[in-house]
Amino acid sequence: MTEPITLSVIKADVGGYVGHSAMHEKLLEEAGLHLENAKTRETLVDYYVTACGDDLELIMTHHRGVDNTEIHQLAWEVFEACTAVAKKLKLYGAGQDLLVDAFSGNVRGMGPGVAEMEFTEREAEPIIIYMADKTSAGAWNLPLYKMFADPFNTAGLIIAPTMHDGFRFEVHDVKGHKRIFFDTPAEAYDLLVFIGASGRYLIKAVYSKDGDIAAVSSTERLALIAGKYVGKDDPVCIVRSQGKFPAVGEVLEPFTMPHIVEGWMRGSHYGPLMPVPVRHATPSRFDGPPRVISLGFQLADGRLVGPRDMFDDPGFDRAREQCGELADRLRRHGPFEPHRLPMEEMEYTTLPQVMAKLGDRWQPLP
């Protein structure tokens, strides 16, 4: 039997160039050197390094399983080394996502975002990896629902015998620290009760009905970990496609509708999630609008064949135009809702510090 492969995508903001808009090439080079050494030592089977905005993205394959200490320590050491480079270059927010001083066995809960899955490679194994900047971990809820539960998006749910039974969703309550599973289509309405509140209830993973992993996302909420605003989550997501999973085109289709996500400037505003090629993943207008990139790979015995820049396609031009229009309309609201997040969502931004200064000036109503 073929040995299972593990695909790990681990990201962190280790320093922005310029401001929060992009990643300096020297950080990418530093990360590549460390991962190449790990490949030479056979810790990794293969790797790819990229960036989305000011977030460093490590894509790694190996045979060590999910939550492996050696793999997570490797990622942590890469982030530390890149932070040192960022500090020398005086890049903005150097080491921003490294919330603790020392590695303690697993990067979960330490600041970086993590999406990992272990599976046995099929005869053909197409993988789509999404990476976002200037948004929160709940940004994947709507796209994942549309990919795996919406027949208006995914025709295979209706016409493909391999998908007709639907999928199982694992949903995390990131504030209550618990999880629940829903089977679709039977429990689609129950699923929507929760995932529509994407600030708290996040789709962690999707499975076929026979238990095979189909998709996994990072659900780390930086503000909940740190107890204060230290930047947005800037999440990642891995999706397997074709065969008993949605086709590549069905996996990409949700991003033709620019849905509104939280994040943007100072993590305090709603904005449209713009699908862009990697070269345009450099958000600068009001530190945005929020961006998402999509890299496609074929896996071959753990080797990453690719990537293909899946959003480098004129088929997404209209979505980008719509994002510009939505951004204009929301920006005109300035500090007013619905552009600014509701007060209950601003708890972990910098606004409470301003409000605290005025606390003594409030008087009881006569």
Image: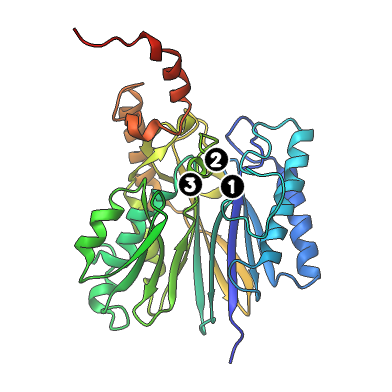
Q: State the residue position of label 2.
A: 226
> Which dot, 1 or 2, sits closer to the camera?
2
How far is the residue under mark 1 from the one under mark 2?
Answer: 8 Å
Mark 3 touches mark 2? (CB < 8 Å):
no
Mark 3 touches mark 1? (CB < 8 Å):
no
Q: Nearer the viewer, residue 175 or 55?
A: 175
- Which residue is found at the position 26% from the left and 70% from the top? 184
Q: In this view, does 29 lie to the left or right of 180?
A: right
- Which residue is found at the position 64% from the left and 65% from the top? 60
How far is the residue under mark 3 from the one under mark 1?
Answer: 8 Å
Q: In which quarter of the image is the C terminus?
A: top left
Q: In this view, does 43 lie to the left or right of 19?
A: right
Q: In which quarter of the image is the N terminus?
A: bottom right
Q: State the residue position of label 1.
A: 111
Q: Is residue 96 left or right of residue 169?
A: right
Kind of residue indicated by mark 2: Ala
